[in-house]
Amino acid sequence: MKIAVCLKRVPDTTAKITIGPDRKSITDTGLKFVPNPYDEFALEAALALKEKSGGGETVVYSVGTDASAETLRTALAMGIDRAVLLQAPGGADGLAIAQALAAELGAGAFDLLLFGKMAVDDHNHAVGPMTAELLAIPCITSVAKMTIENGAVEAEREIEGGIEVVTCSLPAVITCEKGLNNPRLPSLKGIMAAKKKPLETKPAALGAPTLEIVSLELPPERQPGRIVGEGADAVPALVQLLRTEAKVL
Amino acid sequence: MADRVLAIMEQRDGALRKVSYEVIAAARLLGDVDALVLCEGAVEGTGDLRAVGAARVLSAAHPDFRLYNPDGFAATIGELASGYSAVVFAGTATGRDLAPRVAARLKVSCATDVIELGRDGAAVTATRPVYAGKVLQKIRLTGTPAVASIRPNTFPADKPAEPGPPGEVESVTVPAFATRVTVKEIKAAATATLDVTEAPIVVSGGRGLKEPANFKLLEDLAAALGTAAVGASRAVVDAGWRDHGAQVGQTGKTVSPGLYFAIGISGAIQHLAGMRTAKVIVAINRDKDAPIFKVADYGIVGDLFEILPRLTDEIKRVRAGQ
Ligand SMILES: Cc1cc2nc3c(=O)[nH]c(=O)nc-3n(C[C@H](O)[C@H](O)[C@H](O)COP(=O)(O)OP(=O)(O)OC[C@H]3O[C@@H](n4cnc5c(N)ncnc54)[C@H](O)[C@@H]3O)c2cc1C
C-alpha cells in the first residue's frame, strides 16, 4: 500500500502567542514549533499499516515555508520513507492548500491519504475533506478507530451523543482524531537515518485565495472573578449569586 | 438575490436538533434565510423554523438520507448554493465534515467554528477562535457563496415556545450523486446522551474526584440542574474514568455553555482552551492558587466531597421553590 501523510508545522500548544505588528500574523521569533499533534496520529497510522502489510511506501507532504523541512525530518525520524516540501508562504486559506495537495497527490498515486482532523493553529478542519472532494475520492473525517481490509475501510467517528460507523473503499482520505493510536517517538537510530532520507523541495501550486485575514486580536480578558467563600458553608451564597447576579439558574 | 442565505438544518431521527435554530439565528445576520432540511421523509417542526425567522423551508428528501450521507448532502447543497450569497452550517461533527466538502465543490474556502458573523460591504466577515482560543481571527470570505460553520451555543436561539404556522415546505431536487462513503449506523455512546457541546450547563470533573465512582456526585449535580451534561478533564479521560466524548479542552471538545462548573480541575491552559467562552464559570477546588480561579467568575475553595452534596441539595431546593 502506498500511503501519503499531510503534515503541518504549528506552534507548540503550550506556547504563548504574540500578535505581530501587522495585526494579521503572529510573531515567530522565540516560538517553538512542532508537528501538528493530530498529524502525529496520521503518521503513526501510516507506519503501523506499512509494518502490518510488510510492504509499500510512506511519504509525508507539507505545504509551508522552508522551516517546515525540520518538521518533515521529525516524520522521517519516526520512520516515514521520504518527504516532500511544497513551498508556500504561510496562510489560512484551506482551499488554496487543498488545491496544492490535490495537484500533487492526484491521479491514483496513493491508496490512502492521511491527515490530522485539524491543525491546532488555524482550527480549520478543512484541508483533508477538501482535498478528497477535489480528487473525487471518499473521505471519512475525525476517525478514532479504523480497520482496513481488502481495500475497504471501516471507521468510527464520534458525533454528538453517539458514534458513527462509516465505510468506504480505497483510495480514500482519512482525517485522524485522538484515540486512533499512540504516536511513537523518534528513536536515536531513526533520527540518524532521517538525515539520509530523501526530502524533495518544490513550489506549491496554491489555488487563488478566497479568504483574507482582516485582523488578529486577543480575546477579551474574562472579568476577574471572586472567591465566594470557603467550604460547604459558601454554597448558599454561591447559589444566590448564580440566581440573582449571573441569572443562570 | 445578493442577500439570500441558505441555512443547513441538522436533524436526527426525524427531529430537528437545537443547533438548527442557532444556524438560522446566525444566517439571519447575513440576509433572508431559506432553511434546508435533508431527510428521508417528513421532519417534525418545520413550522418552528418560520417562527424563528426562516423565510422559506426547503426539503431535500431521499431514501438514502435517513442517516448522514456526505456525498448526497454535499451534492444537493452544492447544486442549490449557487443561488445564495452565503451558506451556514452547524459546527457539529456533521457540519464540520460537510461544510468543507461543499466549499471545495464551490471552489471557495470556508470559515470553521465561527463565533461572530457580519458583512463588510457585500463580503461576509467572520470571527473565529484560533491557536486554542488564545487568539481571535477575523476573516473576510471573498468567494461566492461564503461558507461558514458556527460554534454551537454561541448564536442565541431556542426552539420556539409556540410553534409557527406549519406553512408550505418546498421540495428541492436531490441531484444524482455517487455514494463514496456510507454511514452504516449510529452506535449510542456508552455514557450520557446530552453532549457537552450542546448542553446549556456543563458540570466537569477532574483528577480531584479521586476515583471514577465519585463522578456520581457530578451526575447528581447535573440531574439537579436539569438540562446539564457531565464533562471531564483529559487527566481523567486518559485514566479511563470517562469517555473521550466527554473531554473538554484542546484535544477534546470546545464548549460554550451558559454555565460551566470546573470541579477538582486545576485549570491547565489546554483545559481552558475548551471552556473559556462559557458565559459563567464556577470553580470548586481545594487549592486557592489553582489557575482555574483566574478564569472563574465564582469560586469556592474547599473539599469538593463536602461541597458537592450541599450544592446539589441547595440547587434542588431553589429549583423546587421556583
Ligand atoms: C498537547 C496537550 C493537550 C492537552 N489537552 C487537554 C484537553 O483537551 N483537556 C484537558 O483537560 N487537559 C488537556 N491536557 C492536559 C492538561 O495539561 C492537564 O494535565 C489536565 O487538564 C489536568 O487535569 P486535572 O485538572 O483533572 O488534574 P490536575 O491538574 O491533577 O488537577 C486536579 C485538581 O483537583 C484539585 N483537587 C484535588 N482534590 C480535591 C478535593 N478533594 N477537593 C477539591 N479539589 C481537589 C487539585 O487542587 C487540583 O487543582 C493537554 C495536555 C497537552 C500537553
Image: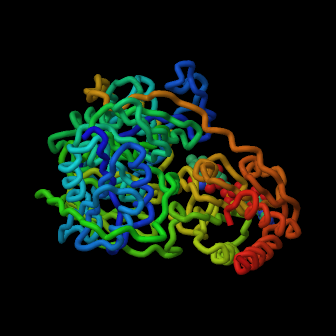
When asked about the image quadrant of residue B108, the answer is top left
When asked about the image quadrant of residue B62, the answer is bottom left
Question: Relative to A138, does residue A13 appear above or below in the rendering?
Answer: above
Q: Is residue B69 left or right of residue B192?
A: left
Furthest residue in direction left, as rendered:
B176
Question: Relative to A178, does residue A109 appear above or below in the rendering?
Answer: above
Image point (41%, 64%), residue name: A159
Image point (31%, 43%), residue name: B86
Quadrant of picture, ligand 1: bottom right
Q: Which of A230 and A35 is in front in this view?
A: A230
Q: In this view, does A143 lie to the left or right of B183?
A: right
| Colouring | rainbow
Q: Where is residue A51 in the image (x, y as percent from the top left)?
A: 34, 54
Quadrant in which the C terminus of chain A is drawn: bottom right
Furthest residue in direction top, as rendered:
A21
Can residue A13 be seen in this snapshot? yes
Image point (14%, 59%), residue name: B173
Q: In this view, does B283 lie to the left or right of B27?
A: right
Can residue A193 be seen in this snapshot? no
Question: Relative to B207, does residue B116 appear above or below in the rendering?
Answer: above
Q: Where is residue A185 in the image (x, y as percent from the top left)?
A: 50, 46
Q: Where is residue A149 in the image (x, y as percent from the top left)?
A: 24, 64
Q: How many marks?
A: 0
Question: Relative to A218, does residue A240 appear above or below in the rendering?
Answer: below
Q: Is residue A68 left or right of residue A28?
A: left
Image point (48%, 70%), residue name: B161
